[in-house]
Image (tube, coloured by chain):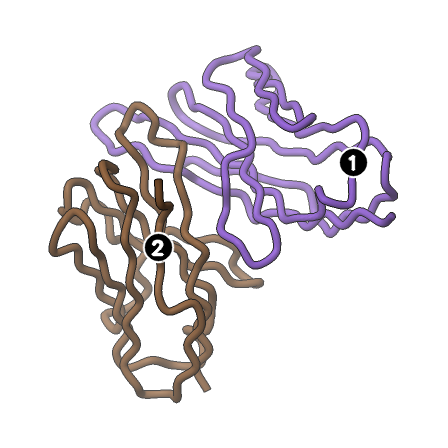
Chain colours: A brown, B purple
Amino acid sequence: DAGVIQSPRHEVTEMGQEVTLRCKPISGHDYLFWYRQTMMRGLELLIYFNNNVPIDDSGMPEDRFSAKMPNASFSTLKIQPSEPRDSAVYFCASSRDRGLFGELFFGEGSRLTVL
Amino acid sequence: GNSVTQMEGPVTLSEEAFLTINCTYTATGYPSLFWYVQYPGEGLQLLLKATKADDKGSNKGFEATYRKETTSFHLEKGSVQVSDSAVYFCALSSDDTGANSKLTFGKGITLSVRP
């Protein structure tokens, strides 16, 4: 089975531009998570979905960040406008159900650099 | 709230050395505990887990025992290899009543193993 697929793997953009990161979870997984990883702050949960519905977005840093999950096989994380401090690796992860909640399957990440 | 504290890194060892990475936690209820590993350029992947007190998780020569009395879940390996060089994250999942369970990660620790 294919794992969690993220795109793009690398993105370099200029401050003020819109950035869209994409994620395809593992088929059959009901939970989808967006994480951000930086050297300073480690791994931070931004938002997660259950059956395409956002459950907890308390980790979303600002209104510049938004996430959607229009269907069970696709999610986006958008930053508009982007700022240099948004530079990080963004991970998408999915899991099967609450009973196995701790066993997340991560994508390879999208490395974002905002100049 | 829930939290995970990992020892400060990085850790550098010679091949075949003994490894201990400390992890302590604070949680309400009865958490499950996990170790995730992140190899260079990849997403996190589950290494091992324990779901109740005194359980021992093991995988790839790594072990960790869920110690409720000391609220710890230290990771050990008797003889490390160069291929074990990675970042290791301790995490917990707490199924609080009325809330949605989610993973809380520690900051991670980088392990480098010299030939």
* Helix, strand or loop under label 1: loop
Q: Which chain does the numbered disc 2 sit on?
A: A
Relative to B79, A30 lies left or right: left
Looking at the rendered image, the quarter that the N terminus of chain B falls into is top left
Mark 2 is surrounded, within 10 Å at the Cα level, by few (under 14), some (14 to 19) or many (20 or more) other residues, namely: many
Q: Residue at x 46, y 78 (%)?
A: A113
Q: Which mark is residue B65?
A: none
Q: Amino acid at mark 2?
A: Ile
Which residue is tagged 1?
B80
Q: Residue at x 28, y 48 (%)?
A: A25
Residue B5: x %, y % from top left: 58, 39
Residue B97 vertical placement versus B46 (above, below): above
Q: Residue furthest top?
A: B54
Q: Toward the viewer: B99 or A8?
A: A8
Q: Toward the viewer: B69 or B106?
A: B106
Decide: marks 1, 2 in contact (CB < 8 A)?
no
Q: Toward the viewer: B26 or A83?
A: A83
Which residue is tagged 2?
A5
Relative to B71, A99 lies left or right: left
Q: Residue furthest front?
A: A1
* Helix, strand or loop under label 2: strand
